[in-house]
Image (tube, helix red, strand yellow):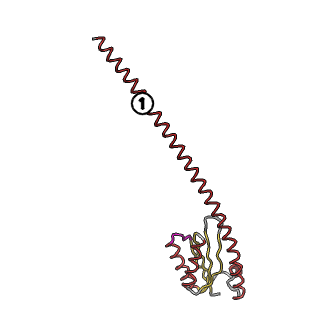
Amino acid sequence: MNRALGLIEVVGLTNAIIVADTMLKASNIKMEDVEITKGMGFVTVKVSGDVGAVKAAIDSGKSLAVSFNKFVSSKVIPRPAKSLDGFFHLDTEDKLEVNAKDEVKTLSKEKVKEVEDKNKAENEKKEEKVEKGSEIKNNLREKEVKIAETVKVESKEIKKTQSKKAQKDSKNLKTSE
């Protein structure tokens, strides 16, 4: 087999689609799969083709992902082991490849829904944290105000006490003269 397998991992489904589009336009390759990983929003795009074409495609996808600051990793596997053929459908006929792509599209819609739900839940958690942070800041501000008021009251009392003591001391000095 003179084909190569190319893998590129980026953050976000939209970025993965843009990277895949760029790679497919840059070289004569076939897109094998788009895999959404669990956690961190990583998405892996898998392509195959001639070694040079896959390297060129991965390089173009990598440069685009790096420009978005969404690049995670990439790898080109020239002449992958025979045991990977069935896993990535590298030696299948075009008819089977079309069916595999249709299945990938169906799975992708389900995965997109799953990712959207997950992102929604994460955003809700972030909003809760922001609200809690605002509450904490407000509580701290209230405490700071109370402390400042207490300090003002205490400093006034100290000044009064010092003033009374000074007056008493000056009276004592006058009477002793």
Q: Secondary structure at mark 1?
A: helix
Residue linked to disc 1: 155
Q: Which residues are magenta?
A: 68-72
Return the x and y of residue 2 as percentages of the image width and height: 62, 87
Identify whether 75 is placed above or below 147. Answer: below
Image quadrant in which you'd find residue 57:
bottom right
Q: Magenta stretch containing residue 168, yes or no?
A: no
Closer-to-camera residue (130/21): 130
Question: Farthest residue in the left direction?
Answer: 177
Q: Magenta stretch containing residue 71, yes or no?
A: yes
Return the x and y of residue 39 as percentages of the image width and height: 63, 64
* Residue for point 68% across, 67% down: 114
The residue type indicated by label 1 comes to Ser
* Residue for point 57% across, 74% down: 74
Count of marks overlaid on the render: 1
Image quadrant in which you'd find residue 6:
bottom right
Image quadrant in which you'd find residue 16:
bottom right
* Residue for point 55% across, 46% down: 136
Return the x and y of residue 133 as percentages of the image width and height: 56, 50
Identify whether 112 is placed above or below 164. Answer: below
Identify whether 118 is placed above or below 77. Answer: above
Closer-to-camera residue (44/5): 44
Position of the N terminus by quadrant: bottom right
Position of the C terminus by quadrant: top left
